[in-house]
Amino acid sequence: MCSYLFKVDSTYRFRRLVPKDIIAQALILTASGKPRTEWNISLNTKDHETAKRLRVPHIVDTDRQTDEARAKIVQGQQATPKDPTAQAREREEAAAMAALAAESQARREARGGLRTLWRKRRATSIAALTPEQAAAVDLLKERDAKIEELTAAIAVMEKDKYGPAFQAEQAEATAKQRAEQVARLAQNVPQAASITGLYERYALSGSANPKTVARWRPRVASFVEHLGLDDVTGVKRGDLNNWTAALIAKGLAKKTVADGYLPPVKVILGLAYDDELIQSNPSSGLKVRGPSAVMVRDRDLTDDEAITILRGSLQPQSERLSPEHALARRWVPWLCAYTGARVAEMTPTACWRHTAGARRVGCACDPRGRINQGRQGPSCAPASPFD
């Protein structure tokens, strides 16, 4: 698990909660002057390795803000006592506020019978009420309907502002622009020698997983866009080196470029070489050069982090969650801790298996419930006998 990283759609964000004692003191504020409860910052990247690297400055900055806030708390605790006059004024103000609150509560309790009566009348058919009472109920219902309408409209506006619909429109516009550019580059290129044409032929062959094909397609378009032509016969080894260097310069990790961007281009060049469209494969033996990834911390959770996660799973869940979701928050962290499986491997119930008389859980499955056979076999762990 990677701390402080989470995804919105496909973009990584940095999210870190502000400690409760600092929130209570209102020592870290938002731009609007309200007490900050969390830091939630977009990292503007879809690559996991890049996100891990970009989160480091935010971790340092939030650590600094937290340390400064805690220092202020300590200073406040060590400060000299207030003078008697100020203390007396604060006591008077507190007593006045308490008296006002008590009066308000007393008036509310005195209105209890009337509130019950009006609730009863609002739930009663207006045919059983006097015209004046029915008119009052109608006005209250109209007001409630208007409030619900405005609340729904505000929710839609907030949801669509930067929500899934906005993200989908942005992604669609970007994809359309890239497709038009690639189409212009491919106008004068024979289909047999087209880079995108060769890739689509590979996609239709069924040699790769559909998800892999979909993930690679924009990366092939990125290569064509960088190259400036959609002709495989014009690809030189220097073009590949320049492209990988440009990706590294954008902040992508060397491993991401080597394992995520270069493979589809190598497949295309391999097809072109097999079809004798090119005399040699310029990607043969190609290596990506770039800085090695910096290990800012151990991949495993610390004992304190594990205790925090497991202790959090025992806390009462929000009433807005469905019973299934609440139970998942309660048990999945413990199951992952017991088996070592990932959350995505643990949650599909179709991936529980009986093997050699023992129940096994945490088997990575495809949407049809079939176990994915990785390089080291299926990822499964024995389940507890009482499951």
Image (tube, rainbow, N blue to C red):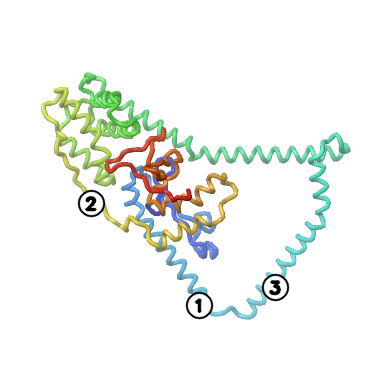
Residue in the image at 57% along x and 51% along y: 318
Does the image show residue 265?
A: yes
Q: Name the secondary structure under disc 2.
A: loop
* Nearer the observer, 17 or 84: 17
68 vs 300, nearest the viewer: 300
Mark 3 is on which residue type? Answer: Glu
Residue matched to label 3:
92
The residue indicated by pointer 1 is 78
Q: In front: 87, or 289?
A: 289
Which SS class for mark 3?
helix
Mark 1 closeness class: few <14, some 14–19, many ≥20 residues within 10 Å: few
> Looking at the picture, does residue 363 appear above or below residue 107?
above
Where residue 354 sits in the image (x, y, percent)? 41, 41
What is the distance, in whole Å, between disc 2 and disc 1 at their CAs? 47 Å
Earlier-in-chain disc, 2 versus 3: 3
Q: Is residue 236 left or right of residue 336?
A: left
Q: Disc 1 vs disc 3: which is toward the camera?
A: 1
